[in-house]
Amino acid sequence: MERLARKIRGGAIAGLMLAALFAAPAGAPAQCPLCRSAVQQAGDTTARTMNLAILVLLIPPVSIFCTIFAVAYKKRNGGGDDEDDDRGLEP
């Protein structure tokens, strides 16, 4: 399980790095028309702050998805670690 958690953590970090790498410049249009008009009227600092806020708000759903995926993956494969604990309990 530790190995799977390490893989998931590495994938999440790689995804965030790719998102930061391919992020649009600070003056680019925002996600919705209301946000776009707010960013156009404000300066570059506000645009950078909004981009950072979008990345921060992305973290909880991604971590919830990864947790659900890890639990489902472990359930599908039967856990693997519990096999040694059940040995010798059957009559």
Image: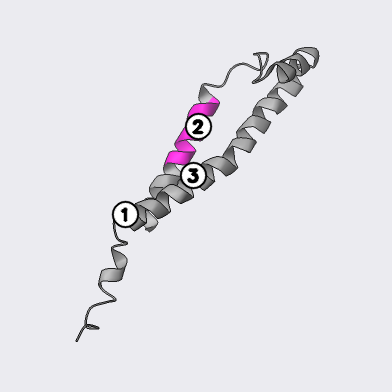
Query: What percent of the width, then of the height, locates residue 70?
Result: 41, 51
In this view, the mark in front (2 or 3) = 3
Which one is in front, 52 or 79? Answer: 79
Q: Does residue 86 sit above or below 78 in this rendering?
A: below
Q: Which mark is residue 76?
A: 1
Please give left or right for residue 17 compared with residue 70 in the image. Answer: right
Q: Amino acid at mark 3?
A: Phe
Decide which of tag 1 and tag 2 comes sooner along the chain. 2
In this view, the mark in front (1 or 2) = 1
Q: Does residue 22 sit above or below 85 in this rendering?
A: above
- Residue at x 51%, y 21% (from the top left corner): 22
Which one is in front, 79 or 22? Answer: 79
Q: Does residue 36 sit above or below 15 in this rendering?
A: above
Mark 2 element type: helix
Q: Which mark is residue 27?
A: none
Circle 2 is placed at which residue position?
17
Q: Does residue 3 sit above or below 57 in this rendering?
A: below
Q: How is the image coloured?
A: one colour
Circle 3 is placed at which residue position?
65
Query: What percent of the width, then of the height, locates residue 72?
Result: 39, 52
Q: Characterize the local packing of mark 2: few (<14), some (14-19) or many (20 or more) Cα atoms within 10 angstroms.
A: few
Mark 3 element type: helix
